[in-house]
Image: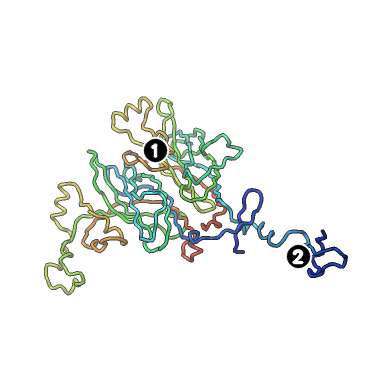
Amino acid sequence: MSMPYQQTGNQIDYQEIKQTKADLKAEVHFIGQIVGGLDFQTDDGLFCELAIDCGDGWDLLQPGNNKGIQTQTSYANPGQLFSWGHPFDLHFSVSNIIGWPKALLKVWRLDSSNKIDACSYGTALFPRSAGYHQITCETWTPTGENLDLEVRKPNEDLATNTDQFSKFDRSLDWRFQALSFYMENLPRLTTLAPLTTDKGDFARRKILNSISNGRVIIEVEVVMKNFKRLSFSGQ
Amino acid sequence: MNTRNYKKDVSDQGSIKGQTNQNFGYSQPQQFQDGISRIQEEMMDPRNIQPDSMFVNFSGVLECGECEDEESLRIEYAVKYGGEDWTYLKTSNNADDAEPSGISQLSTSRNLHSRNIVWNFPFECNFQTKNIFGWPQVVVRLSGPDFMGRSVAKGYGSVHVPTQPGYHERVIRIFKPLPISGFTGFLGYLLGNTAELKNFDKVISSGEGREVTRVKSVGYVKVKFHVTLVNFDKFGYL
């Protein structure tokens, strides 16, 4: 039977409810928390910043502002979890599923002289099926740039290039690493574009060199609306 | 008025002089023997009724946990939910509570070898809602006696209630706020004013204003949830 009836009060009144176009809009809720970080191998305090990045067809309905999340600063013994425990609750309205939301993570370090510095970066993709998921996002720290790759023309193959110096991988640039050793700060990304495929200059990521760092653990529950009705998978 | 003559031909003007046909060309609806029309039966079928709100009923147990080297701990919980769309339904058992919360017994670990403290503290909540945003979360606070026997906070944590129906187990990571400096920490230890959160349920559940706080992880608490969702499929979820 296709005609829904409204039950009002104790008496059943027959009112025809017309289903409008908005009722069949797909919506997704991401409810969870940034649990903490593991394996960062540092004595300093760490906190995490999270920015949500999604395609154009995704409209963040609630919370009203998308200014990002910054967690508390946590200290941990070796092998212990840096516990951030920061809850989040996102409500998206989906008109186009291209650009499924991702969390761009930036882990900061707070050292003993109360100075903050960027520690590492990571991209965590939100799950595409309903239910409880525990996401582990490995993070990396940039150590330098390999600028030779910029000079080369975009479609030029490495093997065909006859220049003898370009055959060596200049990724472990000693100047950059020496500077960061003495200044005790590693390079930072000027923009978060290398983390996301949606916007901006993701292709520039190939000039980066990085070193591995700890992992961030996020627990998230995904609740989907109307995905089954619209024949999208996942619900 | 003779309503039982519906099967008669409506064009029959009646054999008795002066009697006119009451129907004026309209036919009576088809009626079953028990008096309920087919339309009315469809209207009362629960599958056809569009409800106006969803319900979330969950119950659970705050089972056990560990916190650094603590021997005796008490656990308090509060269920925080998004304000406007969600309504907490009080039952007759806990009609006094404006907000769902509770305080458990003070429990001690069994022996020196294990720091596992068991509360086995049950809770149950019912909510009515029209929106998923503001899904309830359980915020806990561990407290116990310090060296002088005063009750101080030992840790905080939070977890979201599972969104899928059925049985789920979760682990709440517990953290403790650190004092601002070594001296205030020492003084607080002596006086019983260790670093605590005022209104811990609001601060931990929302995540606002926590950017400059410093914490240390101290342990975990295991929780078990049993969740039932009502009317979620009528609204397009599930």
Q: Is residue A2 left or right of residue A21?
A: right
Badge nearest the viewer, 1 or 2: 2
- Residue for point 39% across, 56% down: A59
* Protein chain holding label 2: B
Q: Can the viewer see residue B17?
A: yes
Of B24 and B115, nearer the camera is B24
Q: Could one spot residue A74 in this view of the protein?
A: no
Three-letter code for the amino acid on which mark 1 is drawn = Glu
Q: Which residue is mark 2?
A: B24
| Earlier residue among tags 1 and 2 | 2
- Give me the residue at 12% from left, 67% from top: A165
Instruction: Report the residue marked by disc 1.
Output: B68
Q: Disc 2 residue type?
A: Phe
Q: Chain of mark 1?
A: B
Q: Is residue B93 left or right of residue B79?
A: right
Residue farthest to the front, as pictured? B18
